[in-house]
Image (tube, rainbow, N blue to C red):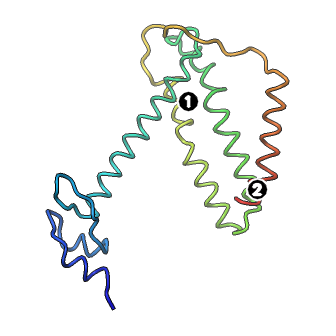
C-alpha cells in the first residue's frame, strides 16, 4: 500500500525541520519562486495574512460607522452613532442565534459550536464599537457625513420581523 509519507520522503525540502514535516504529516505542494515550502510555513503565512485581514476589518468597520457621525471628533457623538450601528446588532444577532441553538440537533455540543461561532465570529462589531466610540483618534470631522434617521420606519420593522421569521423557519432546522 502506497502512503503519503512515502511520497513526502521523495519531495525536495527547503528549510523546515524533518520533525515539523512529520508532525504535520505531509509537505505542501506550494511553491514560491520555484522552491517548495513545508506545510508549516504555509500555515504560518496564511495565518499572518488572515490576522492582518481581520485586524484591518476591525478598523475599517469602525471607520465606516464614523461616516454617520456629524462630528467624528466628538466622543459623545461617536458613541451615539456606534451603539446602534455596531454594538446593538452584535448583541441582537448573537443572542438570537444562541437562543435558537438551544434546539440544535447535536444538543449541548451544537449549542457550544453555534455560540462560539457567533460570539467570536462577529467580534469585529464588538471591537469596532470600542474603536469607533472611544479608541480611534479623530482630530476633525469627516467630510460628507450621512445622518442616521431619528425614527425607525414601519417598513424596517416589517423587514426585520420577516428576517427573524426566516431565521426561525429556515435556519433553525439547519443550525
Q: Nearer the viewer, mark 2 or mark 1?
A: 2
Dot 1 surroundings within 10 Å: few (below 14), some, or many (20 or more)?
many
Q: Is residue 89 above or below residue 118?
A: above
Apparent side of residue 166 relative to residue 31 in the rendered image (left or right): right
Residue displayed at 33% across by 92% down: 1
- Corner quadrant of residue 151: top right
Residue displayed at 63% across by 61% down: 112
Q: CA distance from mark 2 to mark 1?
A: 28 Å
Q: Is residue 88 above or below residue 115?
A: above
Q: Position of residue 109 (x, y in %)?
A: 64, 67
Dot 2 surroundings within 10 Å: few (below 14), some, or many (20 or more)?
some
Q: Position of residue 46 (x, y in %)?
A: 34, 52
- Disc 1 is placed on an element classified as helix
Q: Position of residue 70 (x, y in %)?
A: 58, 9
The residue beneath circle 1 is 129
Residue displayed at 63% across by 26% down: 83
The residue beneath circle 2 is 172
Residue displayed at 17% across by 69% down: 17
- Corner quadrant of residue 4: bottom left
Q: Position of residue 90 (x, y in %)?
A: 63, 38
Amino acid at each position: 500500500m502506497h502512503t503519503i509519507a512515502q511520497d513526502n520522503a521523495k519531495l525536495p525540502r527547503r528549510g523546515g525541520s524533518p520533525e515539523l514535516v512529520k508532525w504535520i504529516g505531509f509537505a505542501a505542494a506550494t511553491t514560491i519562486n520555484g522552491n517548495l515550502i513545508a506545510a508549516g510555513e504555509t500555515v504560518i503565512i496564511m495565518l499572518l495574512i488572515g490576522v492582518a485581514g481581520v485586524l484591518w476589518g476591525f478598523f475599517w468597520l469602525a471607520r465606516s460607522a464614523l461616516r454617520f457621525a456629524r462630528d467624528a471628533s466628538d466622543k459623545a457623538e461617536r458613541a451615539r452613532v456606534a451603539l446602534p450601528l455596531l454594538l446593538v446588532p452584535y448583541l441582537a444577532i448573537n443572542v438570537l442565534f444562541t437562543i435558537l441553538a438551544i434546539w440544535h440537533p447535536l444538543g449541548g455540543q451544537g449549542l457550544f459550536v453555534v455560540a462560539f461561532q457567533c460570539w467570536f465570529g462577529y467580534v469585529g462589531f464588538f471591537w469596532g464599537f470600542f474603536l469607533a466610540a472611544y479608541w480611534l483618534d479623530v482630530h476633525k470631522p469627516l467630510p460628507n457625513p450621512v445622518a442616521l434617521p431619528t425614527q425607525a420606519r414601519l417598513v424596517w420593522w416589517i423587514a426585520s420581523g420577516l428576517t427573524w421569521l426566516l431565521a426561525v423557519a429556515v435556519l433553525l432546522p439547519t443550525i
